[in-house]
Image (cartoon, coloured by chain):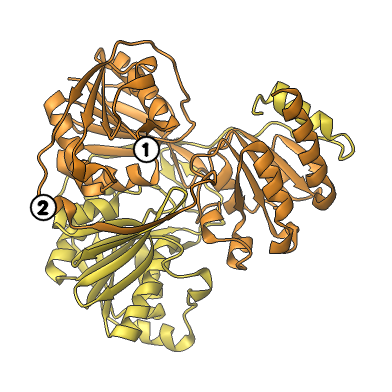
Amino acid sequence: MKILVCISHVPDTTSKINFSEGDTKFDTAGVQFVINPNDEFGLTRAMWFKEKQGASVDVVNVGGAETEPTLRKALAIGADNAIRVNTPATDGIYVAKQLAKVAREGGYDLIIAGRESIDYNGGMVPGMLAELIGANFVNTCIGLEVEGTEATVVREIDGGKETLKTGLPLVVGAQKGIVQESDLRIPNMRGIMQARKKPLNVVEAVEAGTHSKAVKFEKPQPKGDIKLIDPDNLDELVNLLHNEAKVI
Amino acid sequence: MSVLVYTESEEGKFKKTAFEVASYAKGVADMLGTEVTAVSFGAQSAGDLGNYGVSKLLKVNDEKLQKFNAKAYADALKQAAEKEGAKVIVLSQSANAKYLAPILAVQLEAGYASNVVALPEGTEPLQVKRTAFTNKAFSFTTISTDVKIIGLSKNAFGLKENQTQTTEEDFSPSLTEGDFAVNVVSVDKAADKVTIADAEIVVSGGRGMKGPENWGMLEELAETLGAATACSKPVSDMGWRPHSEHVGQTGKPVAANLYIAVGISGAIQHLAGVSASKTKVVINNDPEAPFFKAADYGVVGDAFEIVPKLTEKLKEFKANNA
């Protein structure tokens, strides 16, 4: 089985978010970049398929040279090859079209992408990619097994989960649950050394248009002062929730 | 030309989010000088949809579409959009809507903006405000395609009454075998529990609860309020509570009217995930906990004493206001 894992290069979850150039650009100063957490859950599941079922695992990122350390980390975790499509990740459809070309040329059976990136939160690339290449698609994937050409996928739904059956090729939108947090791997020294020698192929972008553009950013208004309530006077809290906040 | 809205229902009844997306679609239609057409899978009649500005309801009553199927629903919505000449399609951000939206976007060559929180700021070009960086910021996004899809965040717009005469029409999309290549074999869903996605109120516990055996008091508080229960990341990582209850940046976002955090210190990732909630109450014995800076109301003290007392007070309140 040939697996492709799509990797987004995103600010670490602890990052404070700031903007520059008149609030039109994300300010990367002092920001640590990591593998998008949803992608990392997917990559870790791909490692399982590699170790238990002999799958090969490629990783791909659409982005400039600054994203290569993130791809190297994916190689250190255990991916076999990395591909970087050398172009900025402009919008969802643009990225999906770049990935579609890589997917078609590589003839992958299974493509795993995080259900959304934690920076732009578009939540659209996996579904668009599947539709562009005519693959089956399951989103919010929290369980994945493949036997031959048949896949069993568990999808998180609002208030529960459902189990689906489908065939390959398949694209899944992965999230926590496809593996557990404790299954995530920290690359060891051997992995890091090997990753330096593994192929990281840079390919040029295909011509593709965009559909949307983030023209400006804004930070949420800071919260007003908190009202503290005496633990011996909880009637006041009930009163405030009813009469002031009007939520009960 | 019209604004098309995908209205979700459960067992033949519209969900509350259906009325919210309809209200929003009516707002967009007014800006564009057009009307709202709703599409429903499984609803027998328009019911209350007319209260929220829907002029026309397309009823899809295909046996094969009784149960949600992302690809087939997207295909049906595409055909409805083409039939109505819709330029804007509005849908919720339920798990199902988020699943089908990107498929529909490719089929219609439409630009899609997810997590939208307000009516468009302008229509030439269409510009919407959406959350980004997992609620740590907003992004103003323009969509340049002819057809546009807007995914509306829950509770961001609310219900706006707008009495409208709704005409009903049966709609039978033509479906292909390829629409049914992914099939549900089983569903595991607690029928009697309020889900985090649907809840107006969420009661959430953190490490300060000391262990899974202490969750009974949170469940009782939640039950009193008709709330869903949730938890912080460490709690789900330690296996005290299921992952489906983990809220925060890598878990579920919460956009409730009231979010009550008990024994949660308020890591930046957690605060981001719950920031779309309207009113936040924090109960914690550490007055230095970061959550106190992000909440509306706070009680400093021992959760094990405060939570049962609060539950009693709320029961009294409910009894007096029933």
Q: Is residue B205 left or right of residue B3?
A: right
The picture's colour for chain B is: orange
- What's under tag 1, amino acid-wise? Glu
Q: Eyeballing the image, is A193 above or below A223?
A: below
Quarter of the C terminus of chain B within the rendering = top right
- Residue sitting nearer the eye, A163 or B302: A163
For the point 28% across and 48% down, the residue is A92
Instruction: Classify mark 2: residues with Cα within 10 Å, few (<14), some (14-19) or many (20+).
Output: few
Q: Nearer the viewer, mark 1 or mark 2?
A: 1
For the point 80% across and 35% down, the residue is B313
Q: Eyeballing the image, is B263 above or below A171?
A: above
In primary-sequence order, the first of circles 1 and 2 is 1
Are dots 1 and 2 in contact, CB under 8 Å? Answer: no
Q: What is the number of the mark on residue B243?
A: none
According to the image, label 2 marks what residue?
B177
**For the residues marked 1 and 2, what is the alpha-carbon distance in whole angstroms?**
25 Å
- Residue A114: horizontal and vertical position, in percent? 36, 59
The picture's colour for chain A is: yellow
Q: Is residue B313 left or right of residue A23?
A: right
Q: Chain of mark 2?
A: B
For the point 52% across and 47% down, the residue is A17
- Residue B98: horizontal and vertical position, in percent? 34, 45
Instruction: Classify mark 1: residues with Cα within 10 Å, few (<14), some (14-19) or many (20+).
Output: few
Q: Eyeballing the image, is A61 above or below B76?
A: below
Where, by quadrant of the figure, is residue A139 drawn? bottom left
According to the image, label 1 marks what residue?
B11
Where, by quadrant of the figure, is residue B199 drawn? top right
